[in-house]
Image (spheres, rainbow, N blue to C red):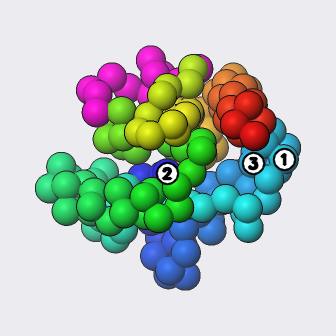
Amino acid sequence: VGEGPGAEEDRQGLPFVGRSGKLLDELLAQEVGLDRSAVYIANVVKCRPPENRDPEPEEIAACRPYLERQVELVAPRVLVTLGNFATKLLLDTRDGITKLRGRRYAWGDGVVLVPTYHPAALLRGGSERVAEARADLVRARLSLMEGR
């Protein structure tokens, strides 16, 4: 679960199709062993906020029922949150991603939630953050394997 569509996602009508999406695809393939067709990708907000600003609390609240329904229909065993907005919303916390990442959380009915950095932050943040995100995705893979 990501934050919301960027310019390229808005143009194409698909999630994570820009530079962030390419990085996400690479990380999923390398660390989880899955390609895009094997995962479901959703966003907290469904429309691109003007001028690429952060989503407002009202926008998040308006889109929340749609995200909840998506998760209900997909019924994932493992849910990976990408960045602050998705992680704070789904864990119902004010703590940030740097404090919350690095472990797994029980969420919902038997779902494991694994928070990690948003790929856009990884593109700006350097190799240490990329290594941390890789470790987070290994946690997601282990959770999938344990659930079999």
Q: Secondary structure at mark 3?
A: helix
Relative vertical location of residue 57 with respect to residue 97 in this rendering, above or below: below
Residue type at numbered disc 1: Gly
Is residue 122 found left or right of 6 in the rendered image?
A: right
What residue appears at the point 48 percent right and 52 percent down from the top-left corner? 2
Q: Is residue 98 magenta?
A: yes
- Residue 147 locus on image (x, y percent): 69, 37
- Closer to the chain start, of discs 1 and 2, is 2
The residue singled out by tag 2 in the image is 1
Judged left or right of residue 24, residue 118 is: left
> Crowdedness of circle 1 by 10 Å Cα count: few (<14), some, many (20+)?
few
**Type of secondary structure dominating the magenta stretch:** loop
Question: For mark 2, does the 10 Å Cα neighbourhood hold few (<14), some (14 to 19), or many (20 or more) residues?
Answer: many
Determine if residue 102 is in view: yes
Instruction: Identify the residue under disc 1.
Output: 33
Q: Is residue 33 above or below residue 144?
A: below
Q: CA distance from mark 3 to mark 2?
A: 13 Å
Mark nearest the camera among 1 and 3 is 1
Q: Which residue is mark 3?
A: 28
Viewer-closest of 50 and 69: 69
Mark positioned earlier in the residue sequence (1 or 3)? 3
Look at label 3 and name its amino acid.
Leu
Image point (73%, 61%), residue name: 38
Q: In the structure shown, which secondary structural element does the residue marked by tag 2 occupy?
A: loop
Residue 90 on image: x %, y %:
36, 40
Q: Residues within 10 Å of mark 3 (few under 14, many from 20)?
A: many
> What kind of residue is marked 2?
Val
**Rounded to the nearest whole Å, what is the CA distance between mark 1 and mark 3?**
6 Å
Inter-mark Cα distance, 1 to 2: 18 Å
Q: Quadrant of the C terminus?
A: top right
Q: Quadrant of residue 108?
A: top left
Q: Which residues are magenta?
A: 92-102
